[in-house]
Amino acid sequence: MTPEQQTVFALDLLRTEVASGGFDCYSAAPVAPTRSRLGGARPRGVRDDV
């Protein structure tokens, strides 16, 4: 695969994981649980207070 194809594949995989709820968007972030590395951006449907 070309680097472009690898990137698309990785993003597809990530999107699938997020959609299935199998990806913890905070597990790798060394910050407070209500903030992400993206400046607080969260996937749709994820609440701050959980």
Image: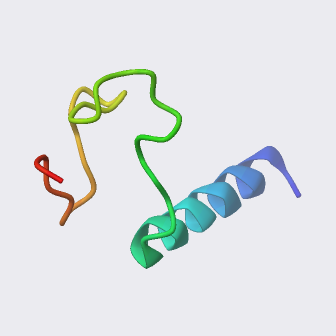
Q: Is residue 12 above or below residue 39?
A: below
Q: Nearer the viewer, residue 49 or 17?
A: 49
Residue 42 position within the rendered picture, expressed as x and y whole percent measured from the top left: 25, 48
Coloured how? rainbow
Q: Is residue 32 left or right of residue 23?
A: left
Q: Is residue 20 left or right of residue 49?
A: right
Residue 48 position within the rendered picture, expressed as x and y whole percent measured from the top left: 13, 47
Q: Is residue 15 above or below residue 43?
A: below
Residue 2 position within the rendered picture, expressed as x and y whole percent measured from the top left: 85, 51
Q: Is residue 31 left or right of residue 28?
A: left
At 42% from the left and 71% from the top, the residue drawn is: 21
At 28% from the left and 25% from the top, the residue drawn is: 32
Check the image and name the residue furthest to the bottom: 20
At 67% from the left and 50% from the top, the residue drawn is: 7
Check the image and name the residue furthest to the right: 1
At 88% from the left and 58% from the top, the residue drawn is: 1
Q: Nearer the viewer, residue 13 or 22?
A: 22
Residue 10 position within the rendered picture, expressed as x and y whole percent measured from the top left: 66, 56
Check the image and name the residue furthest to the front: 50
